[in-house]
Every structure is written in structure tokens, then in C-alpha cells.
Image (cartoon, grey):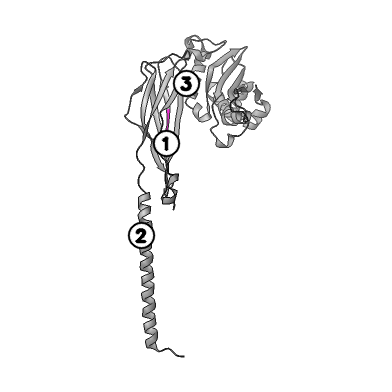
């Protein structure tokens, strides 16, 4: 059976009309979805929290007049300071948390906002060693577009943060066998200069100076640090000796060779990284105190810093020792 040209013309018009109608209907059906998407992109409300920092000396007495230098990382304080501790040794910051849209740039219509309060701070007080630390707080605000799943919505909570800073007097840095007054001892002056230079780098190595920091016995100088946490995520599950050696001890050994040595009255240097670990199967157990000790002649530390021996060769000749 043959179709006439006229019949084909009518069929073509009918097909085109149905196609246009389908496209129109599809556009109408998509309109509510677009409206929901626009609604889901509402900005997160601004939130703030209070951060109280309290300065105490080694005898738990409040320290008045301590200046705090704030380095914002996420969020910002209300006001520009100065931030100075009061009679109680306290200073309270009102912090504007930063809301980061974790789903921005994705095809997800739900929204997760990560509220962050993150900043570094360091102290400045006459007669006291500088104290450095970092405040980190995060929480999530979630908004789900699908009506049947709104029970998954949650609001971020930003409770007050309190942090205690224990400040040590500069004279407390020097321990057994060390002269307290740097004007009376070139060794004490060198150790104090090393302390002031290295302490700013300590947070990046996961340590802080222990107290006392320096001690002397029979021409052997001991430098002590306290391990806080690994700064490399891959070391989080490593044993204590591996964590402290790779993360902290090797960089500090190079720093000692570069910035502390040589010292004419010293023959050997002992680098100590102390810390605590809790049993993985008993979170309520008393933490166990550990020490990682690296002992070597000062010329070995100088060679490591100068690059004339590799870190592997240095550790083979002077292996770290774990003391419990």
C-alpha cells in the first residue's frame, strides 16, 4: 500500500506537535525540582562561640598581663585586641566560626556546613617562656532536601571552649648542673638562645619543650622535649618509638647540630622525647610514660646537620632507645 505525499505531511505535523508537547510537559515537571534546589542553597546562619584561655604558672597561680598573639586559621575573633589576661589570668575571646559548605560544587542537593573554630596562639609575658598552642573545634549543620528524610537534619552546636596554659619562668628551663643566669655561663646563654629559636617550630614537629629543658652531667648535655601528637597522619598508628623518631627526633637532631652545637665544654648530647600512651584495650587505664633517647657525640649531630652522613647512617650508629 502506497502513502500519498499529502498523508505523510499530516503525519509529520502530528509527530512534531507531539514532540513539542512532550518537551513542554517535561519542562513543567522539572520546575518544582529546580525550586527545591534553589531553596537548598540558602546560606548557613552565622554562629559564634566563646574561647577562654587561662594562664597559670608552674605552681597553679594565675598570671596577669599575659599578651596573646592570635593567628586565625578558620574563623576570626570579634575585635582586633589586644588580648591580655586579667587578674584571674583569663582572657575570653568571642570567635566567629567559619561555615564551610562541604557539598558546594557537587551534584548533591542536600547541604552540609562544617562550622570551624581554628586558630594558633602564643603568649608574651616578661620573665616567662613563650607558650604556643592550637585551638580546634568543628561541628556540622545538615539540611536535607527530601521531605521524607528531614529527620536527618541537624544543627551545629558551638559550646564554650576553655584552655589552660601553664607558663614556666625562663630560669626554670635550666635543670641539674646548669647555671641559671645566662650572664654567668656561655653554655646557659647558648641553650636559652636555642630554646627561643626552636620553640616556634615545636608545634609543627608535634612536641614542646619539657621541664626542665636542659641538664648537664659529666660533659653530657641532655635536651628534653615532650611529645604531644604526630603531625603526619600516616604515623598515627605507628609505635611510639617510630612516631617520635621520624616525626620529631630526627628534625630536632638536625636542629641541635645546626643551631646549638658546637659547645666547647660538651662532648656528648642526649636528645630525649618523652610522652605517654594508653593501652588500646583499656581507655580508663593510667597512661604509661615512655622516653625515646638518642645519645651521640656532638660531632655526630654536626655531621647529620651538615649532610655528611645520612639520617639512616646516623640512626644505625646511634639507634634510638625506648625507656619505660
Q: Position of residue 199 (x, y in %)?
A: 49, 24
- The answer to which of 88 and 182 lies nearer the viewer is 88
User: Does 315 appear in magenta?
Assistant: no
Q: Which is more N-terminal, label 1 or label 2?
A: 2
Nearer to us in this view, 90 or 171: 90
Can you say whether 184 is above or below 17 in the image?
above
Residue 306 lies, in percent from the top left, at 58, 28
Quadrant of the rendering where the C terminus is positioned: top right
Splitting the image into 4 quarters, where does residue 286 fall?
A: top right
* Badge 3 density bin: few <14, some 14–19, many ≥20, Cα 10 Å: few
Q: Earlier in the sequence, mark 2 or mark 3?
A: 2
The residue shown at (37%, 76%) is: 16
Q: Which residue is at the far bottom?
A: 1
Q: Is residue 309 visible?
A: no
Res 18 visible: yes
Nearest-to-viewer mark from 2 and 3: 2
| x and y percentages locating residue 305 in the rendered image | 57, 28
**Real-space CA distance between mark 1 and mark 3, rounded to the nearest whole angstrom:** 31 Å
Mark closer to the observer (2, 1) = 2
**Range of residues picked out in magenta:** 116-120
Residue 52 picture quarter: top left
Vertical placement of residue 32 versus 44, above or below: below
Mark 2 Cα within 10 Å, few/some/many (few <14, many 20+)? few
Q: Do tag 2 and tag 1 residues touch (Cβ < 8 Å)?
A: no
Residue 203 placement (x, y as % from top left): 49, 28
Q: Specify the principal SS of the magenta part.
A: strand
At mark 3, the secondary structure is: helix
Label for residue 31?
A: 2
Query: What's the residue at 51%, 15% (across, down)?
Result: 173
| Residue linked to disc 1 | 116
Quarter of the image where one finds residue 256: top right
Residue at the left extreme, as displayed: 79
Amino acid at each position: 500500500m502506497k502513502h500519498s505525499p499529502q498523508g505523510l505531511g499530516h503525519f509529520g505535523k502530528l509527530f512534531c506537535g507531539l514532540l513539542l508537547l512532550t518537551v513542554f510537559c517535561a519542562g513543567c515537571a522539572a520546575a518544582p525540582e529546580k525550586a527545591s534546589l534553589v531553596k537548598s542553597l540558602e546560606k548557613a546562619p552565622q554562629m559564634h562561640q566563646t574561647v577562654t584561655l587561662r594562664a597559670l604558672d608552674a605552681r597553679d597561680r594565675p598570671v596577669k598581663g599575659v599578651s596573646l598573639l592570635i593567628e586565625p586559621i578558620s574563623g576570626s575573633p570579634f575585635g582586633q585586641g589586644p588580648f591580655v589576661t586579667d587578674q584571674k589570668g583569663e582572657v575570653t575571646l568571642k570567635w566567629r566560626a567559619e561555615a564551610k559548605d562541604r557539598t558546594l560544587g557537587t551534584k548533591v542537593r542536600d547541604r552540609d556546613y562544617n562550622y570551624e573554630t581554628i586558630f594558633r596562639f602564643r603568649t608574651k609575658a616578661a620573665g616567662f617562656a613563650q607558650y604556643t598552642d592550637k585551638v580546634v573545634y568543628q561541628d556540622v549543620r545538615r539540611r536535607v532536601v527530601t521531605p521524607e528524610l528531614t529527620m536527618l537534619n541537624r544543627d551545629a552546636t558551638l559550646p564554650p571552649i576553655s584552655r589552660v596554659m601553664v607558663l614556666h619562668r625562663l630560669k626554670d628551663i635550666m635543670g641539674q648542673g646548669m647555671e641559671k643566669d645566662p650572664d654567668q655561663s656561655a653554655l646557659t646563654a647558648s641553650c636559652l638562645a636555642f630554646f627561643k629559636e626552636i620553640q616556634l617550630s615545636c608545634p609543627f614537629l608535634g612536641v614542646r619543650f619539657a621541664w626542665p629543658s636542659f641538664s648537664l652531667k659529666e660533659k653530657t648535655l641532655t635536651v628534653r622535649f615532650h611529645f604531644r601528637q604526630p603531625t603526619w597522619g600516616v604515623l598515627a598508628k605507628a609505635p611510639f618509638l617510630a612516631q617520635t623518631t621520624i616525626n620529631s627526633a630526627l628534625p630536632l637532631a638536625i636542629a641541635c647540630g645546626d643551631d646549638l652545637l658546637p659547645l666547647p665544654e660538651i662532648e656528648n648530647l642526649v636528645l630525649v622525647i618523652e610522652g605517654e600512651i594508653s593501652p588500646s584495650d583499656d581507655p580508663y587505664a593510667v597512661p604509661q610514660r615512655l622516653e625515646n633517647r638518642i645519645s651521640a657525640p656532638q660531632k655526630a649531630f654536626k655531621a647529620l646537620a651538615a649532610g655528611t652522613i645520612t639520617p639512616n647512617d646516623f640512626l644505625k650508629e646511634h639507634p634510638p632507645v625506648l625507656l619505660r
